[in-house]
Structure formats: structure tokens, C-alpha cells
Image (cartoon, rainbow, N blue to C red):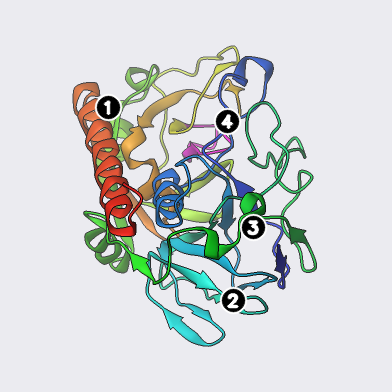
Amino acid sequence: MIEILSNGAPNVVQDLGRYGCMSYGVSRSGAMDPFALSIGNALVGNDRGEAGIEINLFPFRVKFHEDTRFAVTGADAKASLDEQRLAPWWGRTASARQTLVIERPRRGARAYLTIGGGINVKPIMGSKSTDLKGAFGGASGHGLMRGDRLEVGNGQSASDRPWKVGLGVVPKGLLEYWDELSTNCISVRVFPAAEFERFTPESQTAFLRDEFKVTPDANRVGYRLNGPVLNQSQHVELLSHGIVAGTIQVPPSGQAIVQLAEANTCGGYPKIATVIEADLWKLSQAHIGCGIRFELTDIDTAVVALQTRRDEELRIRDTLAMMSGRA
């Protein structure tokens, strides 16, 4: 069992999401940075889709009530176990009554805590993810607050697993991305959406040339951006239609909105572009005030980028399995 020691409604139990339910108006939910969650699970010997805790508000404190294997991934955040500093993207065993503290990230926006054996909450519609809009899943449909206790590990103790010493990983490109975040501006790849051609040539150029800022109106549903006003050549009313994570909509204000993990299942604002799936994790780690530049690509490139990301995840999981004796 683990006990939450800090208030933080935005801190939620998430797995890789709830699929096949959007036609019922249910968002996918799931981790904003699924790669970080998956590698965190690999570090503790779990299946890639096991639920962990997505930490969006810091400092985050949790107490272990039994020997527990855990890992911290995601943002570049200082973490310590009973004041003993931990390396980033590292897994190790905590003893009963030890406390883990994760401070506000130096680079990035959210961190992930994964637990050996997983978090024992009831799956709903095939997922343990918290849907904050629908108030279900995870820990009774709400964020984690001080005093909440979660059953973990499926009844296994840390000594039942072949993890005796700490183990860490540095995914390809992670350090380069953290360096990019340090400049307070990142680039993400997009391809044109259905209404791209309806925007004026000046707006199309500005969208791909100018910098947008993540505003404080940013959460798991999406980011409102502040940047050049994007205008249509002719205003057209659209019927509501399906949208997904990565969709960039433009409401009447002309300021772009990017849909993210808890994206609305439908909407009627015109869509100027879509962030490729392989770059959504980069966007999810962009903090409030961070600059965003959009780089035009094509679907073939997007498919290759996603497959490369999946291949890297598989390579890391295989390597960690061999290092821990589980291969």
C-alpha cells in the first residue's frame, strides 16, 4: 500500500488509455506521456500498459507502507527517497515507512510514478485510467489528495521479484529534448487538417512561421495557445464532428487550441492541423509559458516516426529484461 501525503487534484491514476469508447462520447484518457509511463513500467517489471500515477502538481509526496519496487520517469524532476537523491528515469526498491518526494521539474511538465505489480484499482471500460470529466476510473474518478491510500503490487512483495539494486535508462533523444526545453521553445511536427485550406494564406504562413505560447489555460483536455490570430478566408459554420488528441482547432478568437489526452470526442471548430502521434509526448511535457513552433510534415513521415518510437520502446524493454534477469 502507498499513502499520498500531498494535496494535488491534478495528480491522477493513468494507464495507456480507454480505447473503443469514443463513439459513446467517452474520451481515451490515459497518460499524457505514454512513453514515459511505459518505460517506467519496464523499470519495475510490469506490462507496458499497467497503471501508474501521473504527477501534474508538485511537490508530490508518497509514503510506502511495505517494501515496494518503484520508478520515476517523465520530466526532469528532482526526486529523493528519505532525502537520498535519486537519478532521473531510475527504478529501485523502497522499504516500508520510507517517503518519496518529487519536486517541481526543472525541465518538463509532468512525472510518472510506477509501482512493481501495478496499482490495484478497478478497470472501467477496459482501463484503470481516471476520466476527470466523467468522474470515473482511477481512484473513484478524482485526483489524488492527502490521505488517499492505494493498494499496489497485486499482493507481491518487493522480495518476490528479481530486483535487488537500482536500474535506470536514458531513452534516445531525451537529453536533447530537455536541452530544447531549456531554450523555452520546442518544435512539433504536424500535417494539414481538413480545414487548412480554408485559412488565409497569411494565417497559414504565420502558423508555420511564428511561435505560440502555452497559456495557463492548459490541462489534460488540451492547451490553449497564445500566438498569431488565425483567420479563415470565409467564415463557415461546421457541424460537430469527431476529433482526437493532437487536433489543433481554431475558435472564433483565432487563437489555437490543441486537444490532448482527454480530448473532447467531438467539436465544431475548424481544424488547421494535427500533431503527429510520435510528437504528442513532447507537447505534453511543454510547461506553461513554453513556446511551440509547428513544423509541417507528411503522413508517411509520421508513420515512420511512430514506428521508430515503438521500436525504441521495445529495445529498451528487452534490454532492461536482460539486465534484471527476466529475459
Please indicate, yes or no, whether residue 288 appears anywhere in the rendered image: no
Q: Using the numbered discs, state the Cα–Cα distance from disc 2 to disc 3 in whole angstroms.
A: 23 Å
In the image, 18 versus 230, the foreground residue is 18
Q: Nearer the viewer, mark 1 or mark 3?
A: 3
Q: Which residues are magenta?
A: 249-263
Q: Is residue 206 left or right of residue 55?
A: left
In the image, 261 versus 209, the foreground residue is 261
If you read the primary sequence from the N terminus, does the residue marked by circle 1 or circle 3 appear first?
3
- Badge 4 is on which residue? 28
**Residue 3: x percent and y percent?**
72, 67
Q: Nearer the viewer, mark 4 or mark 2?
A: 2
In the picture, the disc for residue 11 is 3
Q: Nearer the viewer, mark 2 or mark 1?
A: 2
Residue depicted at x 39% and y 41%: 280
Please indicate, yes or no, whether residue 286 appears anywhere in the rendered image: yes
- Badge 2 is on which residue? 95
- Badge 1 is on which residue? 201
